[in-house]
Structures are given as structure tokens and as C-alpha cells.
Amino acid sequence: MKRELLHRFFEGKTSLDEERQLRQWLTESEENEKIFLQERITHDALSLTPQKVRNRRKKLFDFTPWMISTAAAVALLIIAGGLYLNDIRSHQEQYNTILVPPGQRINLILADNSNVWLNANTTLRYPTQFSRKKRTVYLDGEAYFEVSRNRKKPFIVKTGLGEVKVTGTSFNVEAYSQSERFETSLFEGAVDIYNGEEKLTSLKPNEKSIIENGIYSISKITNTDKYLWRHGLIAFNSKKLEDILLTLEKYFAVEIQIDTNQLPLHTYTGKFRQSDGVDYALRVLQKSIHFNYHRDEETGIIYIKK
């Protein structure tokens, strides 16, 4: 990877094709991540005086002060959390976009002091400063929000499958574009669920709403293990192997093909750490549910067999 491209990326001057090329390069090896980290530190050390660091902190990152007190801390956060930032100007507003790689998660503080956790394979687009009338973010993936209360300025989460509007509360949104499933789980306060301009319902604490295949439903939250992803855990409670494999596909960005019509009917209850990877999860599952698998080294596809 050319140093010029890396430094243009740090300055927000790369094209979309160049950014995709860079993200692909980062996933190829740990050595590439180390090079990225070192170049980021070098770039910041050369280009940022203390005053510029303070100005750029307010303009670009919107993290808590201890996260961005030095240029090195910024670079370490970018790599350790799987965080790649790119400034986007849209409708005269400046936006940040965060992309969380497979098996990772990231925590950040927005400009209004709202706290957000982002799950693996999630993209969040948000303005550096919210407008006077509303606070709007754009989500593809899964996120847990602890929204700072402001009744005069609603907080809106827009996804490709629906919207959530709140004034201050704690809730989880799952809306991966490839899954066609839009799920909102409420823990405190109240949220309104929208489909376009149409308000569908308001949730109460410990309720969740699901829109899937055009069908809308509301139910009680009976088990909170699935929300442990914020702590780096993937939890399953009496789940069939097929459902577990779909979750692993989503979190680790792998394709898993089932080469049998006779999957074991047993269910599994347990937890995995995202950082252990998909192969570790599959090996643990094999101890409880009898199946075989192999990974095609060229395509990366995982094949499940009886």
C-alpha cells in the first residue's frame, strides 16, 4: 500500500474506490494493520500541533476527551476497535462514517453526549454536530444507544428497513440490510417505531418490535443474553444449529453453506467471545452438536456437513 494513499485517507481526500481498496488491504494481514497504525501516528505527529489536535477533536471524532488526548491514542483506537473514519459533506453538514469489521465492536460518544455501541459488520453515519431541530443518524447493522435526553430535539435512527424516534432512552436496534429484519428492543424510557412517515407503535420498557418479511409484531423481552454483544459475547439460548450459523455469518462476514438436508435437531445454549473467531465457535459447537465442516481456502466459504 502506497504511503501517499494512506495519508490522503487520513486527510479525508480518498475516493470511494480507494477507500474500498484500503479496507480490503487492512483485512489481509496483521502486518498491514501495524503499517496503518504506524503511518497514522507518523501523519498525526507531523501534521497536528496541540492546537490543531484540539480543533480536530471537536471537528472530527466526537469521542470522550481521554480517547483523543494524543494523536497516538487516536491511532490506537482506530486499529484496536476496527474503526475507519471518513469525512463526508452532505447538504452542507459534515458527517463521519464508521465501519466496524467482522468480529469487532466499537464504543463512541456522539456530539450530544449520547453513548453508542456498534456491533460487528455495522456502519453508522452521523453528523459532527447535530442540527437545531433533530438528531439523526443512519445505521446499517446493530447498535445499542443510550441517548442523552432532549425533548425539544428528538433523536432519530434511520435504517433501510424502518426508523426509531426517541427523546432520551436506552435501546438496541438490529437492522442489517442483507437480513431484511428490523428489530428494536427497549430497556428504558419510550421509543416510537416508524415505517417511512407512518408511525407503527410506541414501545414500553422490556418490549421489542420486529418487522420481517413485511410482518410486524411486538413481544416481551424474556432473555437479555443476545444483547451481551456489547461485552464481546455472542450468546445463544436453546437455538438450533441453522439459526446459530446465520448469526455467525452476520457477525463474522463469512458465507456458510449447508451441504445436508439432515442437520441435527439438537439445540445449543452457550456463549462465545467474538474475538475468538468463527472457527473456534464452530469447534465448540461440534462438541455439543454433531456435524462436520471445512473451509475452502480459496473462496473462504465454510461448508457444513452431517
Image (cartoon, helix red, strand yellow):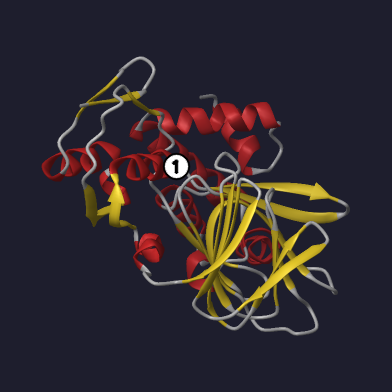
Q: Residue at x 85, y 74 (%)?
A: 132
Camera-side residue: 207 or 176? 207
Horizontal placement of 186 versus 166: left or right? left
Camera-side residue: 12 or 211? 211
Q: Residue at x 81, y 62 (%)?
A: 198
In which quadrant of the rendered image does the C terminus lie? Answer: top left
Q: Quadrant of residue 218?
A: bottom right
The picture places residue 257, in percent across and down from the top left corner, at 37, 26
Depicted 197 relative to depicted 32: above or below: below
- The residue pinned by badge 1 equals 250
Residue at the left extreme of this rendering: 287
Q: Amino acid at mark 1?
A: Lys
Horizontal placement of 213 versus 304: left or right? right
Residue 75 can be seen, yes or no: yes
The picture places residue 304, in percent across and down from the top left corner, at 27, 27
Q: How many marks?
A: 1
Horizontal placement of 138 versus 144: left or right? right
Camera-side residue: 124 or 21? 124
The picture places residue 102, in percent across and down from the top left corner, at 42, 42
Disc 1 secondary structure class = helix
Residue at the top extreme of this rendering: 298
Residue 129 can be seen, yes or no: no
The picture places residue 191, in percent across and down from the top left corner, at 65, 75
Horizontal placement of 30 versus 73: left or right? left
Residue at the right extreme of this rendering: 91
Q: Quadrant of residue 242?
A: top left
Label 1, residues with CA under 10 Å away: few <14, some 14-19, many ≥20:
many
Depicted 42 relative to depicted 208: above or below: above
Depicted 145 relative to depicted 263: above or below: below
Q: Residue at x 41, y 49 (%)?
A: 104
